[in-house]
């Protein structure tokens, strides 16, 4: 999700791993998915309007939109396309879209656009390529330039999962089966600050931290949430980019919380959503959680089994993850991911609005603050 102009834009994954609703699973990955193509919708605060359907002009291979990012007055969208290679589209008005890159930057194996960031007046685009290593490109508004390929020197880095700018540097965060890596880039040189050859080991000392799912700047500190499918997600903080402090481990004491999926600052607090794998025997049958951290790094569970506001998954276990967070019209919006392997039960993604100023019941948070 991303605000652009007078609307909040939402990109979807529209993929069905069941080719036949009463058949067997084709495969547990999107490469073999059946899709009508990604959709993009926008919201003006009252009504929804669809602005992209069928994967951009009928290309169902564009199964999902993983990125929406504003650059030089235009909204850019990066797709998931494992059949032909990822694509990048843009719009000036939210309604008319044009492609500026197709075919995975020349490689069908470059299946997904992941991170996007603006740095030194250029748009940076990170690409997932499981077979050849992650890639990084820049766009100046007219042409593309390849900045890095082959996993930025380590071919096991198969995705530049996210990026952000902090203290004058571009930070790049990867997925790596042997532990996530972190790099900085000053416009000419990469420096590994976490990974093989860096001052911090891969995975920030835990190799099962395979990927970075959410990053945020909060009170001039950099916060990083991991993906750990075995022991639960971790949350780290750094004041200088080199030294990291672990704040949360093992998925908020629930190792089935595998991702801290996204984070967003809102009204002086940092909000973070999780993906929950579920417990045996009901894997993927527990809803995601939403947490809030205050400037003193105290945590509250807002949505979850002990949630101050709602039960896990906003009361629906099918919402197994809080996939994206955005601020629009001074409200916080949370978009969910649903358990798509259950065709008879799933209802599709949901979007929830959190408005502290809305009329309603009065709650007391765990640190004594009042929330309306």
Image (tube, rainbow, N blue to C red):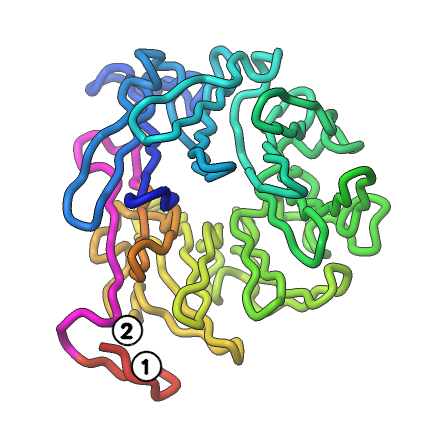
Q: Is residue 239 above or below residue 112?
A: below
Q: Position of residue 178 (x, y in %)?
A: 70, 41
Q: Is residue 29 left or right of residue 223?
A: left
Q: Is residue 172 above or below residue 28?
A: below
Residue at coordinates 36% horizontally, 56% vertically from top-left? 327
Q: Is residue 241 above or below residue 136?
A: below
Residue at coordinates 26% horizontally, 62% vertically from top-left? 354
Residue 31 located within the stretch drawn in magenta: no
Label 1 residue SS: loop
Residue at coordinates 75% horizontally, 43% vertically from top-left? 185
Give the position of the N terminus as an image quadrant: top left
Q: Nearer the viewer, residue 171 or 248?
A: 171
Crowding at dot 2, Cα within 10 Å, few <14 / some 14-19 / many 20+, comes out as: some
Give the position of the C terminus as an image quadrant: bottom left
Distance between mark 2 and mark 1 Cα atoms: 7 Å
**Quarter where residue 52 is shown:** top left
Q: Position of residue 300 (x, y in %)?
A: 39, 74
Q: Which residues are magenta?
A: 338-361
Numbered label attached to residue 365: 1
Farthest residue, direction right: 197
Say whether residue 279 is visible.
no
Q: Is residue 362 above or below residue 324?
A: below
Q: Nearer the viewer, residue 41 or 161?
A: 41
Q: Position of residue 87 (x, y in %)?
A: 49, 20
**Quarter where residue 90 is shown:** top left
Which of the marked residues, 2 or 1, is nearer the chain's N terminus?
Answer: 2
Determine contact: label 2, label 1, CB under 8 Å.
Answer: yes
Numbered label attached to residue 346: none
Determine which residue is flagged by label 2: 308
Residue at coordinates 53% horizontally, 21% vertically from top-left? 111
Q: Nearer the viewer, residue 89 or 128?
A: 89
Report how many numbered discs are placed on residues in the image.
Answer: 2
């Amino acid at each position: 999700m991303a605000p652009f102009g007078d609307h909040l834009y939402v990109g979807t994954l529209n993929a069905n791993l069941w080719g036949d609703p009463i058949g067997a699973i084709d495969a547990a990955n999107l490469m073999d998915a059946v899709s009508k193509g990604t959709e993009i919708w926008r919201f003006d605060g009252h009504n929804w309007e669809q602005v992209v359907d069928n994967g951009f002009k009928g290309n169902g291979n564009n199964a999902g939109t993983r990125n929406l990012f504003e650059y030089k007055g235009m909204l850019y969208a990066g797709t998931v396309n494992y059949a032909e290679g990822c694509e990048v589209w843009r719009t000036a008005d939210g309604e008319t879209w044009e492609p500026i890159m197709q075919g995975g930057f020349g490689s069908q194996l470059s299946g997904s656009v992941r991170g996007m960031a603006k740095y030194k007046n250029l748009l940076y685009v990170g690409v997932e390529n499981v077979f050849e290593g992650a890639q990084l490109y820049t766009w100046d508004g007219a042409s593309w330039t390849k900045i890095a390929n082959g996993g930025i020197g380590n071919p096991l880095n198969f995705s530049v999962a996210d990026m952000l700018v902090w203290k004058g540097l571009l930070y790049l965060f990867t997925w790596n089966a042997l532990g996530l890596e972190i790099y900085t880039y000053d416009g000419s040189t990469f420096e590994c600050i976490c990974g093989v050859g860096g001052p911090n080991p891969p995975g920030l000392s835990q190799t099962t931290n395979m990927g970075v799912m959410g990053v945020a700047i909060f009170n001039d500190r950099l916060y990083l949430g991991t993906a750990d499918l075995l022991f639960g997600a971790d949350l780290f903080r750094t004041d200088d980019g080199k030294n990291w402090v672990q704040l949360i481990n093992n998925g908020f004491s629930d190792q089935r919380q595998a991702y801290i999926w996204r984070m967003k600052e809102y009204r002086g607090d940092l909000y973070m959503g999780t993906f929950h794998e579920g417990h045996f025997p009901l894997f993927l049958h527990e809803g995601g959680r939403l947490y809030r951290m205050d400037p003193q790094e105290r945590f509250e569970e807002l949505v979850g089994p002990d949630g101050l506001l709602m039960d896990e998954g906003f009361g629906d276990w099918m919402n197994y993850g809080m996939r994206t967070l955005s601020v629009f019209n001074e409200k916080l919006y949370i978009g969910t991911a649903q358990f798509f392997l259950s065709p008879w039960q799933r209802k599709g993604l949901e979007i929830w609005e959190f408005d502290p100023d809305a009329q309603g019941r009065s709650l007391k948070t765990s640190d004594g603050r009042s929330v309306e």
